[in-house]
Image (tube, helix red, strand yellow):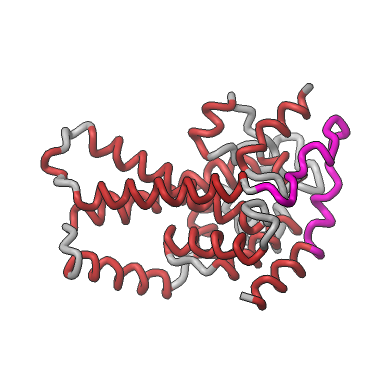
Amino acid sequence: MLQLTLEFDYMRSISLNICDCPLFNAVEFKQIVPKKDSIAGLIVALLIITIWAASLSVLLYFDVTKFSNWLIPIAIIWQTFLYTGLFITAHDAMHGAVYRKNIKINNFIGSLSVILYAFFSYRQLLKKHWLHHHHPASENDPDFHDGQRINGIFWYFHFMKEYWSWHQFIGMTIIFNLAKYTLQISNQNLILFWIIPPILSSIQLFYFGTFLPHREPKEGYVRPHCAQTIPLPVFWSFITCYHFGYHQEHHEFPQVPWWQLPSVYKQKIQ
């Protein structure tokens, strides 16, 4: 944990040089920096994890034969939305935005979130995410396409290749079988509510958090962030991807938690 804390502090010190300088002057930097002693981010993170865990527990043991046919897709979409919340929570932790007062707690929440999501390594995600912020839309950006196939489908698979690993597959296989044979959870429930939602969530995160914000506009990229905002109304911005569509604002002020991004965008357009 000490190594991870030092690693986090080091990457933060070398990587925020790009994002510390906003491209617009309408927003007072001090107005949108969360207070260091605020526990709001921690409360939001714990709420998302708790709702995800409670929902998954109910859905895994629910007799799906009693579901109406139209309810199963809704349940899958709901669980997908919660999985996306898990990853967004981990993403906030990578920027120290979950609990700034105690970086160990902040990183623990981030690690827990990505493990629950799909057995990701928080340390590896942290390294790659700071590369993304430091070298957006370049060959050094692990989130960017391969420079040749910019189609969204090819880009998505290239994106997933950067992050998926065999240890995740092995870990999920072990948990799947333990849940099936030890906890007596049916294959159908595991597939519908534990396997499918994170896959759909990865597509949601990629589309709204990488493809739309970082594809090159006709007039070319605006550097240094090479990011653009998807200006949806606040409600739909939340529903689509926890305000991750306010992506230029995120790159300019990465220390701002997801639930404060609408305020940044509002100040920008005023």
Identify the residue at image location x=52%, y=69%: 121
Q: Residue at the far bottom: name it.
A: 3
Where residue 38 appears, as percent x and y from the top left, is 68, 47
Q: Is residue 178 above or below residue 204?
A: below
Where residue 138 appears, as percent x and y from the top left, is 72, 57
Q: Is residue 176 left or right of residue 240?
A: left
Identify the residue at image location x=67%, y=41%: 247
Find residue 82 and report its image quarter: top left
Find residue 185 and report its image quarter: bottom left
Q: Is residue 266 left or right of residue 142?
A: right
Q: Can the viewer see residue 65 in this picture?
A: yes
Of 236 and 89, nearer the camera is 89
Magenta residues (range): 13-38
Q: Is residue 237 above or below residue 197?
A: above
Where residue 15 appears, as percent x and y from the top left, is 78, 61
Quadrant of image for the N terminus: bottom right
Q: Is residue 247 magenta?
A: no
Find residue 187 and report its image quarter: bottom left
Q: Can the viewer see residue 226 in this picture?
A: no
Identify the residue at image location x=70%, y=57%: 101
Identify the residue at image location x=39%, y=45%: 80
Of 208 and 59, nearer the camera is 59
Quadrant of image for the C terminus: top right
Of 147 and 157, nearer the camera is 157
Where residue 189 appears, as percent x and y from the top left, is 21, 52
Q: Is residue 35 left or right of residue 233?
A: right
Counting labels gives 0
Of 83 and 148, nearer the camera is 83
Q: Is residue 25 above or below residue 196?
A: above
